[in-house]
Image (cartoon, helix red, strand yellow):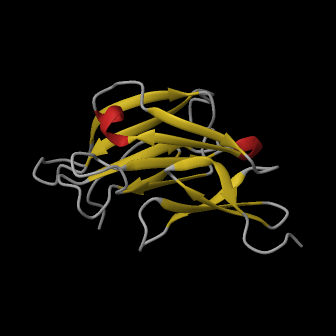
């Protein structure tokens, strides 16, 4: 049964479990076109708003992006008064890091960018035990472990094959 609907060609991530109300981040999908052949890209946050009738979700915030997303994740890192951190993986090994709190306030939300991978970043995941750590994966067996406290030098576990 469909509960809510967003008319977007996007990759999505739920807000962290400690976030209330529940939000959904949607980043325009890489290598996809929508029905209007629109080439713009954005990172958007929607409210689940289950108490509202109808299938539509309320758009709370939208930030244009120069890059489309292969994958996005939303973790709780950022402190007590924070809405967490959203990370998107894009072309050319680009990883974009956003403050969800700033994005919800329609402020300049990008807090970091890194281009360490040699190809598109298709895999992202937060560490469930240390909220400041996340992993990224791309082609050619590239895996990096990142610390949000210092994203300048990621760790590369093992050797590339």
Please indicate whether residue 135 sits to the left or right of residue 21 in the image. right
Image quadrant of residue 132? bottom left
Q: x, y percentage for residue 138?
A: 74, 59
Q: Is residue 77 above or below residue 109?
A: below
Q: Residue furthest right?
A: 161
Q: Residue at x 76, y 51 (%)?
A: 117
Please indicate whether residue 10 sits to the left or right of residue 84 in the image. right
Q: x, y percentage for residue 29?
A: 59, 45
Q: Residue at x 51, y 42 (%)?
A: 97
* Quarter of the image that includes the N terminus: bottom left
Which of the two residues, 55 or 153, is positioned nearer the viewer here?
153
Image quadrant of residue 158? bottom right
Q: x, y percentage for residue 65?
A: 55, 29
* Quarter of the image that includes the C terminus: bottom right
Q: Is residue 65 above or below residue 74?
A: above
Q: Is residue 111 above or below residue 22?
A: above
Q: x, y percentage for residue 133?
A: 51, 62
Q: Total of numbered circles in the picture?
A: 0
Image quadrant of residue 104? top left
Which of the two residues, 120 or 46, is positioned nearer the viewer here?
120
Q: Residue at x 18, y 54 (%)?
A: 20
Q: Residue at x 43, y 68 (%)?
A: 130
Q: Residue furthest left?
A: 51
Which of the two residues, 128 or 28, is positioned nearer the viewer here?
128
């Amino acid at each position: 049964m469909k509960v809510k609907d967003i008319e977007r060609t996007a990759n999505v991530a739920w807000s962290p479990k400690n976030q209330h109300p529940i939000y959904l981040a949607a980043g325009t999908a890489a290598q996809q076109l929508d029905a209007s052949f629109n080439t713009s890209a954005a990172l958007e946050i929607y409210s689940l708003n289950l108490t509202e009738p109808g299938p539509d979700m309320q758009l709370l915030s939208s930030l244009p992006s120069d890059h489309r997303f292969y994958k996005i994740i939303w973790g709780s890192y950022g402190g007590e008064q924070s809405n967490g951190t959203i990370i998107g993986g894009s072309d050319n090994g680009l990883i974009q890091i956003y403050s969800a709190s700033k994005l919800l306030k329609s402020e300049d939300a990008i807090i970091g960018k890194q281009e360490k991978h040699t190809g598109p970043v298709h895999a992202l995941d937060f560490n469930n035990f240390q909220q400041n750590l996340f992993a990224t994966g791309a082609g050619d067996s590239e895996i990096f472990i990142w610390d949000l406290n210092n994203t300048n030098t990621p760790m590369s576990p093992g050797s590339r094959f």
